[in-house]
Amino acid sequence: MTFVSSAEMKVSLCPEQAEMLSTGETIRQIIRENPDSVMAFDILDGDELIGFVLVHRFEEHKYFLWEYAIDIRFQNQHKGTRALIEFIDYLKVHHGAKEITTTYIYGNDHAKHVYEKVGFVETDVVNEPDCHEVNMAYHV
């Protein structure tokens, strides 16, 4: 897998998945407004664009996996899991990552499965009237 700097998410998702991510405009705005702490990448498998990842460095050596998406054409082929494993290694080698945190919307069993498969562990659950998310962490 190759990770190429990006200014926007270009992958296609089914409507249910798109609802769980930030809008394209929000992602572009996040990238524009945080050039020193946010990194976005297209995920390539050979020459094919298969996914997108957006991370935020919130402390030295600590990153938040803000957005992670695999194009609908490449889902359920283990490419998302492989890409996430390789991206974690990329962050470790090129940016000195020691901890990566993320969240997923409670009930998104597919996200939970992928994150747990690569080594993320649940740290707590946010259960508020307008937010029901699970927080996870990966220690590199």
Image (cartoon, rainbow, N blue to C red):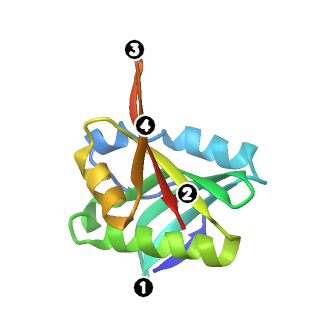
Whether residue 66 can be seen here = no
Q: Nearer the viewer, mark 3 or mark 4?
A: 4
Label 2: element kind: strand
Q: In x, y percent, where is residue 33?
A: 74, 43
Q: Are marks 1 and 4 in contact (CB under 8 Å)?
A: no
Cα separation, mark 4 vs mark 2, equals: 15 Å
Residue type, mark 2 in image: Ile
Q: Residues within 10 Å of mark 1 (few under 14, many from 20)?
A: few
Q: Report the amino acid beneath label 1.
A: Gly
- At label 4, counting other C-alpha atoms closer than 10 Å, the crowd grade (few under 14, some 14-19, many 20 or more) is few
Secondary element at tag 1: loop
129 vs 69, nearest the viewer: 129
Q: Could you say which is closer to the camera, residue 48 or residue 60?
A: 60
Q: Which mark is residue 46?
A: 1
Q: Amino acid at mark 3?
A: Pro
Labelled pair 3, 2 in contact (Cβ < 8 Å): no
Q: Nearer the viewer, mark 4 or mark 2?
A: 4
Q: Is residue 72 left or right of residue 122?
A: left
Distance of mark 1 from mark 3, alpha carbons? Answer: 43 Å
At 72% from the left and 47% from the top, the residue drawn is 32
In the rendered view, would you say 24 is above or below 98?
above
Q: Where does the image place residue 22, in percent across and percent down from the top left?
A: 48, 39
Residue 124: give its label: 4
Q: Secondary structure at mark 3?
A: loop
